[in-house]
Amino acid sequence: MPKSKPTHPKGQLSVIPRIERLLTEQTSVILRAVDAKVSAQDQKIESRFAALDRHLEERLVAQDIRILAAVDRRLEKMEERFAKSLDDLTKTLDKFLKRLTDIEEEFIFLKEDLKRVKAVIREKLGVSLD
């Protein structure tokens, strides 16, 4: 039987392992370059997120301050209205108490006058109204 001839010439057999080694090295270099690019992108993204976080935090703090200032203003207005209402109520109560006191004093005076009238009637007419 005739011997089969190898499909690859003898020189090509030694080239395949070299090509495989070169491809492995090239893949390694490409992967390192991609890793470097991805790392750089990650750092950029992280720095952008950090900047965005700082910006959002500043905005939230500013918004909190505005909200608290608005709440403070509304509370001050409510306190003013409450104080005015309380003052009005106090004035009304003072007026009422003065009128009540005046009526009590008038009642005392009328009682004394009635006692005197009864005394005069008893003295002049001899009739007791008690």
Image (spheres, grey):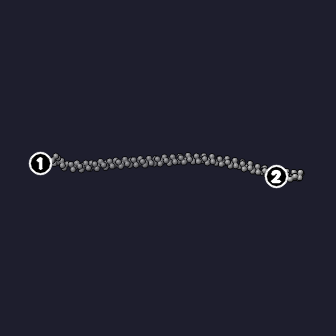
Q: Residue at position x 50%, y 48% from top?
A: 61
* Residue under label 2: 112
Query: 73 or 94, which is in the foreground?
Result: 94
* Residue under label 1: 3
Q: Where is residue 92 in the image (x, y as percent from the top left)?
A: 69, 47
Q: Residue at position x 80%, y 50% from top?
A: 110
Label 1 packing within 10 angstroms: few (<14), some (14-19), many (20+):
few
Query: What is the secondary structure assignment of the residue under circle 1?
Result: loop
Residue type at the position of mark 2: Glu
Q: Position of residue 40 (x, y in %)?
A: 36, 48
Looking at the image, tell me whether mark 1 or mark 2 is earlier in sequence order: 1
Query: What is the secondary structure assignment of the residue under circle 2?
Result: helix
Distance from the alpha carbon under mark 1 to that under mark 2: 157 Å
Residue type at the position of mark 1: Lys
Q: Residue at position x 51%, y 46% from top?
A: 63
Q: Residue at position x 81%, y 51% from top?
A: 111
Q: Where is residue 12 in the image (x, y as percent from the top left)?
A: 18, 47
Judged left or right of residue 96, residue 17 is left
